[in-house]
Image: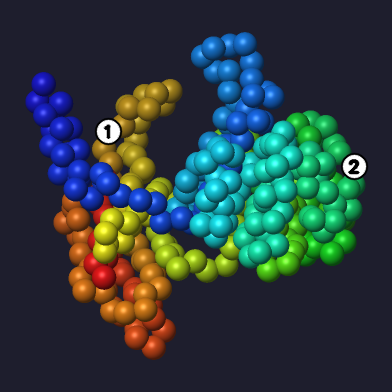
């Protein structure tokens, strides 16, 4: 009972800065209801395949993007609010959604699509690549950060960049200077005022399955090449999730620490402790110096400065333990 009281106090103390807030749009992950229904099974417990959705959300969070998950009906009227959209292996999205996403890119949006079959939905001209052949049950080494990871996909399209820019080069060994293939790991193509990035294999399903750090790094590299700098940027350990909210005249940068100590038993999720992690740096573009910047929910060493010339607020925080929020009052 006392433990339940502790949980209640934890939740209640956070209510004023959590309830009644709205998202600060950054990255929308498309969870197409048309794709979901096309692949639904008869198993009532797990009839909807959400692995690519989860992989997209987890990887974007690890790269410190603010993420919202939206179905087609929810995303379509709000599409232009989001600087970037990720369509993770949503091969059977509606034709109407494909058209809207193309329009979104033409007018300045950033779109990341993945999967061998995405080329059938969006076309080679839009993606800036040649179709290439599809390898089944394929494994290739994908460069990321200062190394590579052994990627797997049930279907892997070996494209060639025609008008698109290549990001990385596939290989058949972890050695990045030999046994390279003439196929990019991903591509980036400028379309109209926006851009589209294409990862031609099931990267998000792969990441949902194993959560390999170098796979997260690869996704982050592609996302950064596509999206660039956003008005709010967070630099923190990978275990810190970022949730961006706003309420009245306040911007709220929620920081959630998912780090854990040594598990009591290797085969379950019970943990002994949650170690504090840091440091964390937050960069926010603001036209005017904020009235106040402070840390809510936890005690920590927070320092901030504002550059009028650059119109930029920089916040430095030494650590987050479980859940803290940086509050920026206009």
Residue 92 found in image quarter: top right
What residue sits 38% from the left and 70% below the top? 284
Asked whether, in this view, residue 101 is left or right of residue 265, the answer is right
Tell me the residue that label 1 is attached to.
272
Tell me if residue 114 can be seen: no
| 40 and 131: which is toward the camera | 40
What residue sits 15% from the left and 44% below the top? 13
Residue 148 lies, in percent from the top left, at 67, 51
Residue 3 found in image quarter: top left
What residue sits 65% from the left and 57% below the top? 104
Report the mark closest to the observer, 1 or 2.
Answer: 2
User: In the image, is residue 92 above or below residue 302?
Assistant: above
Disc assigned to residue 134: none
Disc 1 to disc 2: CB gap under 8 Å: no
Badge 1 element: loop
Badge 2 element: strand
User: In the image, is residue 261 above or below residue 189?
Assistant: above
Disc assigned to residue 133: 2
Please, which colouring scheme is shown? rainbow
Residue 223 lies, in percent from the top left, at 60, 57
Residue 128 found in image quarter: bottom right
């Amino acid at each position: 009972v006392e433990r339940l009281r502790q949980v209640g106090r934890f939740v209640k103390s956070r209510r004023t800065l959590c309830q009644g807030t709205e998202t600060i749009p950054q990255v929308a992950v498309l969870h197409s209801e048309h794709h979901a229904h096309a692949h639904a099974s008869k198993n009532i417990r797990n009839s909807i395949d959400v692995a690519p959705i989860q992989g997209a959300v987890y990887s974007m969070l690890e790269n410190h993007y603010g993420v919202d998950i939206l179905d087609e009906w929810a995303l379509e009227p709000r599409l232009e609010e989001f600087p970037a959209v990720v369509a993770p292996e949503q091969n059977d999205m509606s034709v109407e959604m494909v058209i809207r996403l193309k329009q979104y890119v033409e007018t300045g949006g950033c779109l990341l699509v993945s999967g061998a079959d995405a080329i059938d939905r969006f076309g080679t001209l839009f993606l800036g690549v040649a179709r290439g052949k599809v390898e089944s049950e394929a494994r290739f080494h994908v460069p990321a950060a200062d190394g590579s990871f052994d990627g797997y996909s049930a279907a892997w399209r070996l494209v060639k960049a025609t008008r698109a820019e290549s990001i990385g080069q596939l290989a058949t060994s972890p050695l990045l200077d030999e046994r390279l293939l003439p196929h990019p790991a991903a591509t980036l193509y400028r379309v109209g005022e926006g851009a589209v990035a294409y990862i031609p294999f099931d990267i998000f399903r792969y990441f949902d399955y194993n959560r390999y750090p170098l796979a997260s790094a690869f996704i982050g590299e592609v996302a950064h090449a596509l999206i660039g700098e956003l008005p709010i940027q967070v630099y923190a350990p990978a275990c810190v999730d970022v949730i961006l909210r706003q309420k009245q005249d306040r911007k709220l940068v929620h920081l959630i620490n998912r780090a854990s100590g040594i598990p009591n038993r290797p085969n379950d999720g019970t943990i002994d402790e949650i170690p504090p992690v840091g440091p964390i740096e937050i960069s926010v573009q603001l036209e005017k110096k904020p009235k106040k910047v402070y840390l809510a929910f936890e005690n920590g060493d927070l320092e901030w400065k504002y550059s009028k010339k650059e119109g930029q607020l920089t916040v430095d925080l030494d650590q987050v333990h479980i859940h803290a929020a940086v509050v920026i009052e206009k």
